[in-house]
Image (tube, grey):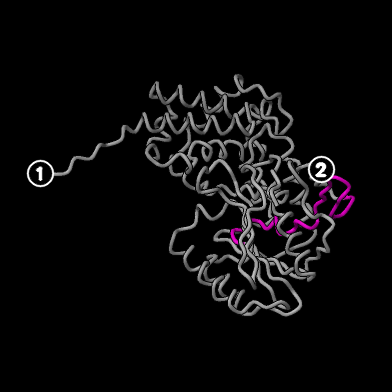
Amino acid sequence: MAEFRAVPDARATLLATLAENADVARLSPSPFYARLLDGMADDVRAGGPCWSLLQPYATEPATEYFPFRALAGVHYEVLAGERPDLAAHFPSVGGDGDADAAWPLVREVLAGRDPELVAEFGHPLQTNETSRCGALIGGFCEVAAATGLPLRVLELGASAGLNLHFDRYRYEQDGRAFGPPDSPIVFRDYWEGGTPRLDAPLRVAARAGCDLSPLDPAREADCLALQSYVWPDEAGRLADLRAALAIARANPVLVDAESADTWIARQLATLPEGQATVVYHSVFWTYVPEPVRDRIAAALADASARATEVAPLAWLRYDEGAADPRVVELRLTQWPGGEERLLGTGRHHAHPVRWLA
């Protein structure tokens, strides 16, 4: 007897995805995008252009964020000055934030969109979220305090490399501080339950990163793409992103276009003496295919066996927890020794970090 397998109802699955994505927007919070996603859901129920646009992706997991990709395409055109009618309502370009007034115009844009263009706004969405440095700094300070050595930092999934400049941002809490006092990006009182060791002797000696499709802060189109992935009414995130792009342009760092497994294996072939090598990433691991993850882990295992007190190794990650993907965990493993610690927890975007170390 043939095995029976239920075929998912495409429209119902897409509506569930839209509802989940709208909840993500509300939590962020982005009421502007939450309202647009509600409008998209109503249009899907009615069999309108949003259904035609997203039907090819209807049964994809909600975490592929195809509705957000569609909206990112609209946002890009607004940022590029191609949609002055929508610019009047998009807060990211000085609009009034009236999502109800924006929705019919957004629907009109989506009605003329080729479904293949939605796929071109790839996932993971390259937000290059600078707020994650507010969590990562705690791990970098731990390594600096434990080793007393300057850091050699290697970022996996670096996008445009904005988080490679974490030491050019400012962090302040409880009388402790790190980073240039005049930095345009400031994390102040960002931690709950404790304070990272912001007074550690942290200095970056070398920095490098990789990404399958790196973006270039010196290219206007790439800068617009990064901004388009940020939700239009999140003024703080946009301001930090724009400031980070300016810092990256003033301090160029090459991000290699390469898979993380082959890149990190080459980088870890040698652990330089007098530097603490830190491999790090943020909201990256979930989106990496298992074979690539295994090869990254193998490269780390090989290098960890060669780590010494004068050439130590650390693996710092701010990634989704296994128990609840809504919670992002800051974990640090250091060699020699191999001790793993949960340093803190937070969320995907700008959000206070609970410090546990």
Residues in magenta? 156-182
Does 156 sit left or right of 182 as displayed? Answer: left
Q: Amino acid at mark 2?
A: Arg
Q: Is residue 174 magenta?
A: yes
Label 2 environment density (alpha carbons within 10 Å; few <14, some 14–19, many ≥20): some
Element at label 1: loop
The answer to whether 214 is drawn above or below residue 127 in the figure is below
Residue wearing tag 1 = 1
Residue 16 x, y percent position in the rendering: 43, 30
Residue at left 75%, top 63%? 252
Quadrant housing residue 23: top right
- Residue 26, relative to residue 351: is it above or below? above
* Camera-nearest residue between 103 and 253: 253
Q: Residue 17 sits in which quadrant?
A: top left
Residues under labels 2 and 1: Cα distance? 64 Å
Where 55 falls versus 184 (above or below)?
above
Residue 117 - label = none
Q: In this figure, which residue is indicated by the disc labeled 2?
A: 188
Q: Nearer the viewer, residue 278 or 146?
A: 146
The amino acid on which the numbered mark 1 sits, given as a three-letter code, is: Met
